[in-house]
Amino acid sequence: MLGIALKLESDGSYSPSKMAIKLGTVDKTDYENISYEKYKGKKSKILVIFTEQKNLTMQNGKMFSTGNHPVEALLPMLHLKNAGFEFDIVTPTGKPVVFEMWAFPEKDEHVKAIYKELKPRLEAPDKLSDFVANSFSNLESYAAVFVPGGHGAMLGIPEDKNVGKTLNWAHQNDLFTITLCHGPGSLLTTTLNNQEFLYKGYNMAVFPDSVDKKTPMIGYLPGQMPWGLSEKLKSLGANLVNTKGDDTVCLDRNLITGASPLASNNLGKLAAETLLKALK
């Protein structure tokens, strides 16, 4: 069928077919440029944990060209910036942030502007390990931890002990944790070293495994996923509030989640409004 052939990249990985890009991405997002009453307090920083890895190996051995989804990262950051917050950008080892550039909304001037502004820091992020070693004591400066989505969030992040330490630090000190789509894979780090899942009993929105299973049919993924995120979270006691990859968002205690790229704008609004209210 026309358009089903995935694009083979120079490193042997596959990015989505023309049909999948047409069905699954946008040139311009639904971002709402809201004028918030800006936060002016001390807790103005948000730690953003990006993946630095690109290729996700599927069950059939083929590699999916992934990374962080640009819309899922940049729309929430636009809202949080408009609300007066600033960002500390990290990857696990300080390697550059990887984006799914095939999903970049090329006609969205707001997204292009913040990407251009952040690009020097995205190309030379700080190390998460350094943050864990040096910044936990600087608690009064931070409001939240944000883990963007994209299938790349399932690469390295769910097994990273420093992600686990950071989420536990945020949880213990009443900071907010914000994540969406496949980003909730980061929450699995709280089970490392045989610890009980930190978010057992929490309501959350996550990208459904049932949708991932269907996307190879349109040439989005080059095969079936190596493991299922939503079912794994359910097995640990999470209550999933969505069954579709839609615009659902969820706030439960200090955890703010979204279901898919379609939830990026809603997640940004919910995060900005929630942080502003909590930090008054």
Image (spheres, rainbow, N blue to C red):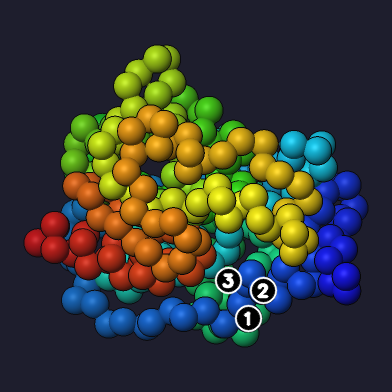
x, y percentage for residue 133? 40, 27
Of the residues under marks 2 and 3, which one precedes in the sequence? Answer: 2
Mark 2 and mark 3: Cα distance apart in space: 26 Å
Left or right of 170, for residue 27: right
Callout 2: 10 Å neighbours few (<14), some, many (20+)? few
Disc 2 versus disc 3: nearer the observer: 2
Left or right of 199, for residue 23: right
Residue 81 seen: no
Q: Which quadrant of the rendered structure holds the C terminus?
A: bottom left
Q: Residue at x 55, y 47 (%)?
A: 209
The total of numbered circles placed on residues is 3
Give the structural element (helix, strand or loop) at label 2.
helix
What residue would you read off at disc 3? 116
**Labelled disc at residue 13:** none
What residue would you read off at disc 1? 27
| Amino acid type, label 3 | Lys
x, y percentage for residue 134? 37, 30
x, y percentage for residue 9? 86, 55
Of the residues under marks 1 and 3, which one precedes in the sequence? Answer: 1
Q: Residue at x 62, y 84 (%)?
A: 107
What residue would you read off at disc 2? 23
Q: Is residue 149 above or below residue 195?
A: below
| Amino acid type, label 2 | Leu
Which one is in front, 223 or 279? 223
Q: Is residue 128 above or below residue 39?
A: above
The answer to whether mark 1 and mark 3 are in CB contact below 8 A is: no
Residue 224 seen: yes
| Amino acid type, label 1 | Asp
Disc 1 versus disc 2: nearer the observer: 2
Give the structural element (helix, strand or loop) at label 1.
loop
Callout 1: 10 Å neighbours few (<14), some, many (20+)? few
